[in-house]
Amino acid sequence: MIRAEGLTKNYGALTAVRDLTLSVGPGEIFGFLGPNGSGKTTTIKMLCGLLSPTAGQAKICGVDVQQQPVEAKALLGYVPDTPDVYERLSARELLQFVADLRKMDRNKAAERMEELLYMFELSDRQDELLGSYSHGMRQKICIASALLDEPRVLFLDEPTVGLDPKSARLVKEVLRQVAGNGGAVFMSTHILEIAERMCDRIGIIHEGRLIAEGSVEDLRRRVLPGTEGEAVSLEDLFLKLTGGDEYRELVKHLSTGTNNSQAQ
């Protein structure tokens, strides 16, 4: 349902994403991980058609995102990494605006809006201007907007940032429901515990290159062979692949030095 072939994005001499190829099938939640500045958001924007690649191709359900942008975007929902909203619209007005853009049936749209506003506990504040909303509330209305037309493919860039535990739990349940109904979910996150628990497969990007892909168990066998049956976390794998082991050793060294100093 999601296919990237040789995706590359250059900004002058800087290559933000280099020759990235991956695919995500129906019913799958794909976790996209990487350090800050590794190319996660750039990749998602190219897959959504918000950014033109320097080279390569992206397809949504077989539809070329560059050649048929309107058709491709009609198949997907997108939640950006920052919940920017039209501050002078209310939550209900924003959802109605999205429904009109997607040419939804009025009755279906109204029913779906009520369902999402109730689900995200925004019903009581649906007529307030979004400019008065907290970060977490803005995040929830952005997710509701992406889910409004029940897209076949859902992209989320750090979806749980700013959400309270209850809302974050709800989002995780909604994503699993989307996948359970045959949709595809592509999600970036810095919270590795979420990725480990939720995602069917993981892709790790580092300095613009996709350096690993597979289930956590697959990555464990390839990256740390001989550790089968041991408590090796996704964090261990991530740090091993992205060079974070050196940082962890430094922290351990500093911590040991501090403890020794206090003991003296």
Image (tube, rainbow, N blue to C red):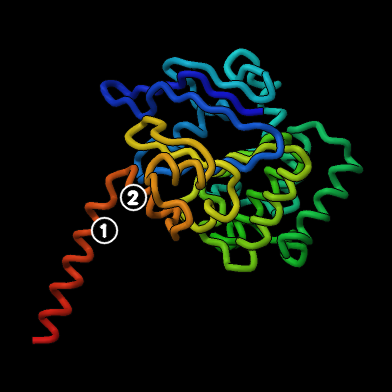
Residue depicted at x 35% and y 45%: 36
* Identity, as a three-letter code, of the amino acid under mark 2: Leu
Q: Is residue 20 left or right of residue 49?
A: left
Residue that badge 2 annotates = 239
Residue placed furthest toward the left: 264
Residue placed furthest toward the right: 107
Q: Is residue 47 visible?
A: yes
Q: Is residue 199 left or right of residue 1?
A: left
Residue 40: which quarter of the image?
Answer: top left
* Identity, as a three-letter code, of the amino acid under mark 1: Arg
- Above or below residue 14? Residue 237 is below
Residue that badge 1 annotates = 248
The percent coordinates of residue 110 (x first, y second) are 86, 47
Residue depicted at x 49% and y 21%: 52
Residue depicted at x 40% and y 37%: 205
Q: Residues within 10 Å of mark 1 (few under 14, many from 20)?
A: few
Q: Is residue 236 left or right of residue 198?
A: left
Residue 26: which quarter of the image?
Answer: top right
Q: Earlier in the sequence, mark 2 or mark 1?
A: 2
